[in-house]
Structure formats: C-alpha cells, structure tokens
Image: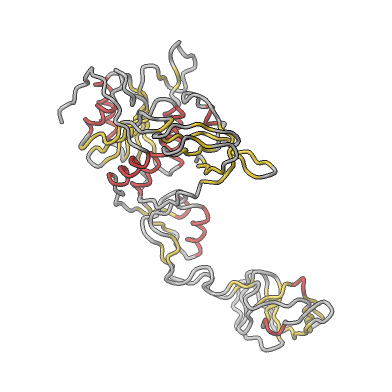
Amino acid sequence: MDFIPLTKKMELFDVHQVQEVKEIISREFKPLNKITEVPIMEAVNRVLAVNIVSQENVPGFHRSTVDGYAVKAANTYGSSESLPSFFTIVKEVEMGVSADFEIQEGEASYVPTGGMLPKGADAMVMIEDVEAVGTLLNVFEQVAPRENVIFQGEDVKEGEVVLKKGHRLRPQDLGALASIGVTKVPVFPKLKVGILSTGDEIVPPDTEVLEVGKVRDINGISISAYVQALGAEVIYGGIVEDQCEAYLLKSKELFEQVDFLILSGGSSMGTKDFSSKVMNNLGEPGVLVHGVAIKPGKPTIIANANGKPVMGLPGHPVSAMVLFDLFGKQIMNQLHGVTENPFIKQMKAKLTRNIASQVGRTDFVRVQLEIREDGLWANPVYGKSGLITNLVKSDGMIEISEFKEGVIEGEVVNVILFT
C-alpha cells in the first residue's frame, strides 16, 4: 500500500456516540477461531473455546452434608426435646466406602460429612440433635426429605452443559471442571496485544532524572497491566518519537506480531498527531472512528486493518484507562468470543453531590465508594485527565447518558467497578 502522506490541513472530528462505537466494534471484529488445550492448573482467566458437557453425575451418589444419622424423614415427624422418636442403629458408613446396605423403617445409620447415604434413607439428622445409647438412638428434631443431603446429580447432571463457550474461567469454574474430571481445558489462545507509546516528551518509567519537559510513560504500564488482567500477552513496542515515518515503521513492525494493536498518544488533531495516518497505512478499510462524544477521551481512534483491530488512545492517563475500559476491553472480548455479563462488575450507590453534564455527550465520572449507615454512596473524584492519582483514588465510574443534563445528589446511580 502506498503511504498516505501527512497533510497540514487540520481535520475536524466526526464524533460518534458511545453506543454507535460499541455497535461498530461488534460489527467489525470477529472471534479468532483457534483452539488450544491447557492443563487445568493453568486455565484460570482463560476463555473457553467450546461448551463443556459433563459425562457424569456430580455427586455420583447421595451424600451427607453433616455428621449425623441417615434416616427415613417420615420416621422423625413430631420429634422434639420432650417427645423424641426412637431408632435402632444399624451399620456405620465409612468415608470413601460404598454403603452397600439398606435401612428399614425405624432404623438409622451413622454417616460422616461427605459420606454415602445407604439405600432407603432420604435425610440426615445432625449429631447435635440425637443421643445414642448403645444401639438405641433418640432423635430430638424432625427433618424433612432431602434435608442435610446432596442427592446424586443434584450439583451436575450427566449431559448437562456446565460451562459455555466464551466464558472466562474463574477459580470456582476450575473447581467445577475438576469435579467432572476435565483436566485438559480447551481454550482460545492468549491474545497478543501490542502497545506502542508515542510522544517526544515521553521517556521510559525507569528514567531516574527527568529533563525539564519530559514525563515517564504511564500508559505503557497501566494499559499493559489491564491487558494482562484480561488474560492476554503484551508485546510492548516501547516509545517512538513524534516523527511520522518512524512511527509508521515501528507500528507496522509491531502490527505484524499481534492480534490487536494499541497506540498510546497521538490521537488528537494536533499537527504532530499521526495516529490516524498510520492506521490508514496498516490496512483496509482503515479508520472507522476518530472522535467519540465522550468525556474524558474524545480523540479516540478505532481502525480495522485487514480485519485486525487498531486503537488509538489519548495520551492523558485517565482518558486512556477509561476509554480502554470502555472499548479496548470490548475489542478483546470480541476477539475471544467472550460472552461476559455486562452487569457482573457493577453496583448501585447513591450520589453524594450534584453533577452537571452536557446533552449530546456521554460523561464518565470517576467515583470513590463510601459505606454509610444508610447504605453505599458514590463520591465524585474530580481532577484533570492528566492526573493518574485520580484513578488511584477511584473505585469505579458512573455513566451520565448523552440525553441527560446531569444527576442530582441522592440519586441512585450505577457504578461500573474498575478491574
């Protein structure tokens, strides 16, 4: 492809609404159809590539959830401290051993927690509610059928879909896989995400003495960490100067190595902001979005380069993090086919003060959560988008719709928690 030259004419933003951008991302980027298997101990935070169907019941037998005695529940009805019911104690069940006998009317069998119920029993009486005298058992509490018992297949049934394709695996999910004997887990390969920081003023974070006018690279670290938290591999391209040919060369080099390229800085309309030009040179159709009706983060760019997503983030750390949380995470989920519940990391809180907003623009306001006697409150964290400590002080953010002029003190708002 011929290089698209940098023009001196300053283009104007053709801004998109937030929902429009989300729809563009959904339409443009498809899941990567690759599958690999990893050991279960390495599968946390990976994304399932197929539905997991159980080949067995869990548990495979009726199990007690307490230490006590297995009985027929109907035989305990009316039992109390003043009028106990009486049972004959028969065989005792041992842990890990099959209970190969059946209890009859008026019989009881000791079963430890997790042990197998003998045939004929449909409930467990806790050991605290009985008194054993030789082979005689006094029961002082009535129980209902299925009480203190997990029945065969109650947790997982044979043929049941335990976890669905696109699910990001959590520790509890790995426990479920272990329970059905799945130790090799089919997952999507880790995404490779390239991150390139731009700007003549940017220097590496390990720079000990800063020259006047220089700042350490915050976005390269924070966005890399966010990408890794989503289970992807980061290929950090370092820092490139504000020189178009060098920027394009480094971007192309990194682009070839990754599934998703992120360019930090250079997304606004200044004369040295080359990101949109670079993106249009990486592949067709090129830039899809250059400008979002949002605060913070208006000069965000999203491009499709031959099917591969490229994202240009603002240089200000707060804007970069908010926009990556909003759109970068969606792109990564798209590539993995993640079917994530959007409400998992959200909670309700009351607002501590009025916040004004502008109709036609979506505002994301950072908030700090505070527990009071009357519930959870969200306190706005104000500050310029270049101040990273604003995010450090924040627990999440609230979205003020493009159709609202603001929110008022005491209003219940939805807090989107930061990862």
Nearer to me, 148 or 272: 272
206 up-or-down from 351: above or below: above
Pinpoint residue 71: horizontal percent, then vertical percent: 68, 81
Quarter of the image where one finds residue 111? bottom right
Looking at this view, name the residue that lies furthest to the left.
2
Quarter of the image where one finds residue 375? top right
Pinpoint residue 381: horizontal percent, then vertical percent: 55, 30
Q: Is residue 224 visible?
A: no
236 up-or-down from 189: above or below: above
Which residue is at a point 58% across and 35% down the rendered structure image?
368
Looking at this view, name the residue that lies furthest to the right.
82
Q: Is residue 404 visible?
A: yes
Q: How is the image coloured?
A: secondary structure
Looking at this view, name the residue that lies furthest to the bottom.
105
Task: Classify residue 98 as left or right of residue 317.
Answer: right
Nearer to me, 113 or 286: 286
State the quadrant of the N terminus: top left
Pinpoint residue 312: horizontal percent, then vertical percent: 34, 31
Nearer to me, 263 or 320: 320
Which residue is at a point 60% across and 36% down the rendered structure image?
352
Which residue is at a point 67% across and 77% down the rendered structure image?
144
